[in-house]
Amino acid sequence: MAVMLGVNMSGRDSSAAVVVDGAVRFAVREERLNREKKTRRFPMLAIQACLEAAGRRLETVDRVGISWNPTLNLERFNGAQSGVARYKPEHFYAVPNHLIQLLPRETSMLAEQRLHFPAGVLDIAYVNHHVCHAADSFLQSPFEEAAILILDAYGEKDAVTFARGRGASIEVLDTIPFPHSLGSFYGTMTQFLGFTPDMDEWKLMGASPYGDAGRYYDALRRLFALRDGGRFEVDLSYFDYPTFTRPTMYSDKLVALLGPPRTGRDELEQRHYDIAAATQRVTEEVVFHLLHHLHALTGGENLCLGGGVAMNCVLNGKVAEHTPFRNVWVGSSADDGGTSVGAALFLASREPGFRRTPATDNYWGPGYDDAQVEDELRRYGLAYRRSDRPAREAAALIASGRIVGWFQGRVEFGERALGNRSILADPRDAAMKDRVNRAIKYREAFRPFAPSILEEHAGDFFEGAHAVPFMEKALMIRKDKQRLIPAVTHVDGTGRLQTVRRDVNPRFWELISEFHALTGVPVVMNTSFNLQGEPIVCSPKDAIRTFFSSGLDALFLGPFVLEKGRS
């Protein structure tokens, strides 16, 4: 039984995953455990949780995969920068950092390190960052063969990777080096609009439908030169992000082009929405240019996307319409958090007899049985009751206009709540979006909430509907259905949907089914169970604290029910 531990520590979204015999056994983001949103800390708690779930000690894991290969950075490496040990144990890296300067500067997809201890050998593999993204996407896709496109701010050297997946193998076909980076462009514009880059790109995407893309399209489009062979170049004179040393990612030249940047304290004006709309349109145009080239390289209709740019559900929902690819897979964690899974899967794929396991969910994190939940409720002296039909009760409360916290099973691994750590409400009430924002989420009014829909009814409500299990795509809601679900219909008529299958999440499917029976609408409004600035709740304690710190009306913890006014 091969056990692979994957670790992401490349920046935000620290995470760990354990893969056993080629399948994800457990995976969790460090933020869910240390309660620090988008944490950059080493994922020690996540690693410990993975080892416990696998029943292993670290020294008995077959291999550890790190989703960043530092040998790819050797060309610019100066070992003296980290070659001095501040205290004796740091010689573990101080000595190699000096010696590595004497080695040939050859790079590869994979670098390996072995540490021998009396307890065993720690076998560490450093895997190319974009290959980890590719493995996370393709090796969990339903495709035996697919084209793969990875786009983010940057990996060790590259900002774009073109690849092909076949069976258990991933072949890199071409790359575009940093600083010609679509992810960094989008992050720069996020900062220009007064938000936090590498965190708030959702806000730019959510604001874009409120703007007129034509107003700033020509100005922003001129920053990109699209070349033959799927290449592009960014006019770097408008950007300061390549230096990694400036407080802003944009230069004075971009300010001269677009006008003054917004600060976080400024009210959003129509001009800001127009810049967001143009940014989104230019991003889509460049991605479609890349995808046409990738299709020319690979043929076929199957595509896997990964990297932070693939978190853009608006873009993802348009790929099949604007490119030759008809079957588009985006995994549940296209951001860096998913590279821990990718690193572990990549190592597993190199083992004899590896068999791919397509992902239908990402309920990979900690779970709590009824006894653990009830112990927590008793510890706080809370008034609660046990329900024989929690899904039916929750559906009835939602249909009556109540806002419900829904805590079931194991926590989702990705950024989005998929029915195990969710806040649920009635999508038929046009005022519900503002109610949830005021009472719980405290976020910008322009940001949409998601519709979770029974998969068998998706085609009735969405154009071009197909399985969308991870809220990874925004699709157009049919015009005759928009009036039925106004709380989850964005200003452009789209919805970032999740299709729910009975065999994947039976309790959440039952809740939506009960709501459908009561209302005739097979959709609930779904947003992540957290307050602004906090990670999604993980434990019963997290859920209880959030319940009493917010405007939630009821909380379902497994079969147990708390209602305001009774606790």
Image (cartoon, helix red, strand yellow):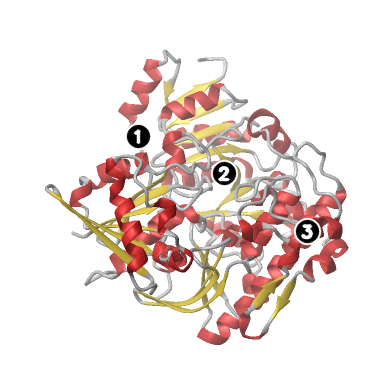
Q: How far apart, in angstroms, are the residues tagged by discs 3 and 2? A: 39 Å
Whole-percent x and y of residue 430?
75, 40
Whole-percent x and y of residue 277?
78, 58
Q: Nearer the viewer, residue 215 or 556?
A: 215
Q: Which residue is drawn at 40% across and 58% down?
A: 79
User: Residue 368: which numbered mark, if any?
Assistant: 1
Q: Which of marks 3 and 1 is in front?
A: 3
Residue identifier under label 3: 277
Q: Which of marks 3 and 2 is in front?
A: 3
- Extreme residue toward the top, this view: 381
What type is the residue that disc 3 sits on? Ala
Q: Residue at x 53, y 27 (%)?
A: 546
User: Residue 517: which numbered mark, if any?
Assistant: 2
Above-or-below relation of 241 to 562: below
Above-or-below relation of 163 to 406: below
Residue 502 in view here: no
Mark nearer the N terminus (3 vs 2): 3
Determine crowd level at label 2: few under 14, some 14-19, many 20+ residues with C-alpha closer than 10 A: some
Left or right of 191? Residue 150 is: left
Mark nearer the N terminus (3 vs 1): 3
Residue 556 in view here: yes
Whole-percent x and y of residue 15?
41, 48
Look at the numbered disc 3 and give the secondary structure of its residue.
Answer: helix
Left or right of 206? Residue 167 is: left
